[in-house]
Image (tube, helix red, strand yellow):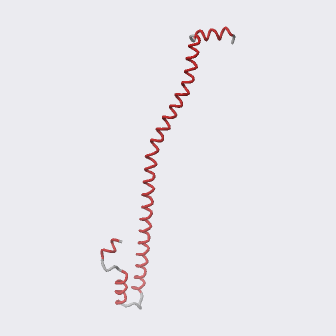
Amino acid sequence: MSVQDITTIIGALGGASGLAALVASFLGRRKIRAEAADVITDTALTLVEPLQKRVRELDAEVTRARSLAREAADALADALSLIRRWRSAIVSQVVTREQLREMAREDLPADPGAAAER
């Protein structure tokens, strides 16, 4: 490109003020991009915060559910153990009816409703 071509282009752009406007528009793009990045970042943080809170709530629920499941599994294991013990005693030819009744009195709570509460 020759000097004459450059002069013609600058003249077509409106001289020095046109060139200044062109430079300002390129610099303005950077500013607009930076502002857009800030808006996107703020929006992302606004959206992520409630999700993080919900994840914490769900973690607490999972912990509680696991605890309840462990308690239920322990109660089931205890009940199966009791049933197996009683079955062995029932089919045994050496255990008397009175001994079976005594086993039942020892193994069951005094209040029938207490078993349901456990």
Residue 111 drawn at (x, y percent):
30, 78
Position of 83 relative to 36 (above/below): below
Asked if residue 112 lies left or right of residue 65, the reply is: left
Viewer-nearest residue: 74 or 40: 40
Position of 92 relative to 8 (above/below): below
Residue 36 drawn at (x, y percent):
50, 32
Residue drawn at (30%, 74%) of the image: 113
> Which residue is outermost to the right?
2
Residue drawn at (50%, 38%) of the image: 41
Position of 8 relative to 31 (above/below): above
Viewer-nearest residue: 100 or 56: 56
Image quadrant assignment for residue 20:
top right
Viewer-nearest residue: 118 or 97: 118
Residue drawn at (43%, 54%) of the image: 58
Quadrant of the image containing the C terminus: bottom left
Q: In the rendered picture of this protein, how many numbered marks are placed on residues?
A: 0
Image quadrant assignment for residue 97:
bottom left
Quadrant of the image containing the N terminus: top right
Residue 35 drawn at (x, y percent):
51, 31
Viewer-nearest residue: 115 or 10: 10
Position of 90 relative to 13 (above/below): below
Residue 29 drawn at (x, y percent):
54, 25
